Amino acid sequence: MTGSRVVALGHYQPAKVLTNEDLSALVDTSDEWITSRVGIKTRHVGGPDEPVDELAANAGAKALAAAGLQPSDIDLVLVATSTAIDRSPSMSARVAARLGMGSPAVLDINVVCSGFTHALATADHAIRAGAAARALVIGADKMGDIADWTDRSTCVLLGDGAGAAVVTADPAAPDTPDGPGIGPVLWGSVPEMGNAVRIEGTPPRFAQEGQSVYRWATTQLPPIARRVCEKAGVAPEDLGAVVLHQANLRIIEPVARKIGAVNAVIARDVVDSGNTSAASIPMALSKLIERGEVASGAPVLLFGFGGNLSYAGQVIRCP
């Protein structure tokens, strides 16, 4: 069976930066309050003339350029997002049109904060099944559009952005000594607690039960993340990097510690970008690679979690 591999990544964020000091002029908060509770210093926010598909297409174009591929080389486009306003054309179809692609299959995936890792697994499965050869997988969200800017407990968390990965068939993957380029996914959810994270209403607004999410993430997710490593045949101490959903620094650091990834680079892009939902994992990994912080071929744990109290993770080989 043909395996698959991530060959390149790219990311994009709007130019406007919103600092903690800026937020203190909008709601009753302060830099000290935000930093001590979630670890976020800044976030990028897009204007009304910067739709989600534009963010996604910009990230996708950068990933394609890094891979040395043309848009016409892609036969599957997957966009993970929970902030698409219109139902049709889909976000993936809009991205394909913006990039001038030929006739790719287009599919949107809405699993909120774990959307990218779900989409990456779906691309891997499609390639393994012979239904695609080259996929563009994007996580893109414009959380500023659904923020309640009067609620200091949630608006301080959110940012806008997109991250993209090019995934290609890798016929040699099963025979390589370090295993497949994309390892097996472990995914699931806690349906009875799905209301802990919500995007509801007209207009839609983000809300969450922060303490419930924090307890679930810090107590239930570390053993699941270790099982992801087991499925990939990689010991946590051998990981080159850990890229968790960038929800909150107070979640990222204890979860990474409990996984046992003692030698890994831990992505902390949340400090500069806030919680960008489905964009957070590919964006954080793209930045680590751009800065040369992870060696090519190193095993990297990707682990998304959040809305629906869903999760999905896999170990990939760094491009």
Image: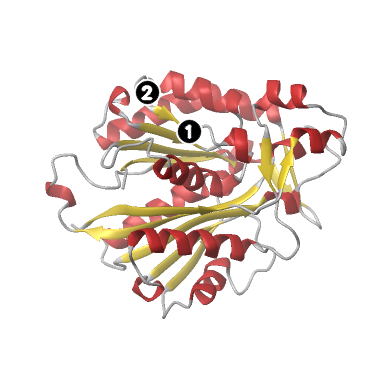
Q: Is residue 67 left or right of residue 173?
A: right
Q: Is disc 2 placed on a helix, strand or loop?
A: loop
121 lies above or below 302: below
Q: Nearer the viewer, mark 2 or mark 1?
A: 1
Please tell me whether residue 51 is drawn above or below residue 37 in the rendered image: below
Query: Is 166 rendered above or below residue 312?
Result: below
Number of marks? 2
- Give the labeled residue for mark 1: 267
Image disc number at residue 261: 2
Alpha-carbon span between mark 2 and mark 1: 12 Å
How crowded is the residue under tag 1: few (<14 C-alpha within 10 Å), some, or many (20+)? many
Q: Is residue 160 left or right of residue 136?
A: right
How are the residues colored?
A: secondary structure
Residue drawn at x 54%, y 23% is 218
Q: Is residue 154 visible?
A: no
Residue 12's image quarter?
A: bottom right
First of labels 2, 1 by sequence position: 2
Residue 121 visible to an observer of this rendering = yes
Residue 250 located left or right of residue 32: left
Picture coordinates of residue 197, whole percent (x, y): 67, 40
Neighbour tally class for label 2: few under 14, some 14-19, many 20 plus, Cα within 10 Å = many
Percent x, y for residue 122? Answer: 39, 56
| Residue at 34% over, 60% down | 67
Residue toward you, 211 or 251: 251
Q: Quadrant of the N terminus?
A: bottom left
